[in-house]
Image: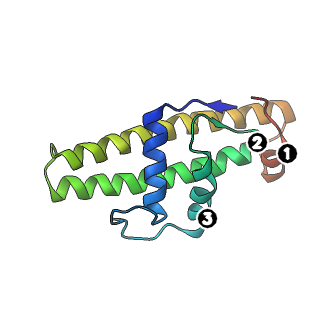
Amino acid sequence: MILACNYEEVTALSHGARALLGESFTESYSAVAAPTEAREAVEAILPLLTGDLSFTTLAEQQVAELAVDSIVEHLRETMEVNVAATHPAAEEAVAAYFEFAHALCVLSRLQELGAEMRALVEVMTGRPVDVESAETFHFPD
């Protein structure tokens, strides 16, 4: 299954992932460090943020969803800090809003894709999704 991502979305996710992992030149505003599982998911998705995302299993989609959700939350915090520290129309605040909004759009589509993948697994296997089916049921691109 392919999740199409435009340049702005990929750029926002990459910047957010690097900032979340502490690889950014700017200060991280997150008050709480990302949980280990979420951090590992962000580390796993970072090399894939070069264009469209492709998932062959539901388990891959779930890891990506966890990563993107963590990135979106970090970008939301960054946006809120920028708005509070400057002005809603300040360049930094507007840029932070657009990064957050682009990442949020990807998260929304990723959640929809996950729901579709879960439904297909259930229809094809005749049972609810479990860890095994999430890892072994393969989707073509």
Seen at 78% across and 46% down, the residue is: 134
Foreground residue among 25 and 66: 25
In percent of width and height, residue 16 lies at 43, 53
In this view, 79 is above or below 99: below
For the point 74% across and 29% down, the residue is 141
What number is the disc on residue 58?
none
Q: CA distance from mark 1 to mark 3?
A: 21 Å
Q: Secondary structure at mark 1?
A: helix
Residue that carries the numbered disc 3 in the rendered image = 37
Instruction: Identify which residue, 116 or 49, lies in the foreground.
Output: 49
Q: Residue extending furthest front? A: 25
Q: From the viewer's perspective, is 109 left or right of 124?
A: left
Residue 95: horizontal and vertical position, in percent?
Answer: 28, 44
Marked residue nearer the N-terminal end (3 or 2):
3
Classify residue 46 as left or right of residue 70: right
Q: Residue at label 1?
A: 136
The first of marks 1 and 3 along the sequence is 3
Q: Residue at x 14, y 55 (%)?
A: 86
Residue neighbourhood size for the residue with mark 2, other residues' Cα within 10 Å, grouped as few (<14), some (14–19), many (≥20): many
Image location of residue 18, percent across then percent down:
47, 58
Query: Which residue has dot 2 on it?
Result: 57
Packing grade of label 1 (10 A; few <14, some 14-19, many >=20) is few
Mark 2 near mark 1, Cβ–Cβ under 8 Å? yes
Q: Amino acid at mark 1?
A: Thr
**Depth order, front residue of 125/69:** 69
**Residue 26 falls left or right of residue 48:** left
* Secondary structure found at label 3: helix
Local secondary structure at mark 2: loop
- State which quadrant residue 119 falls in: top right
Image location (x, y in percent) of residue 36: 58, 69
Q: Amino acid at mark 2?
A: Thr
Q: Amino acid at mark 3?
A: Glu
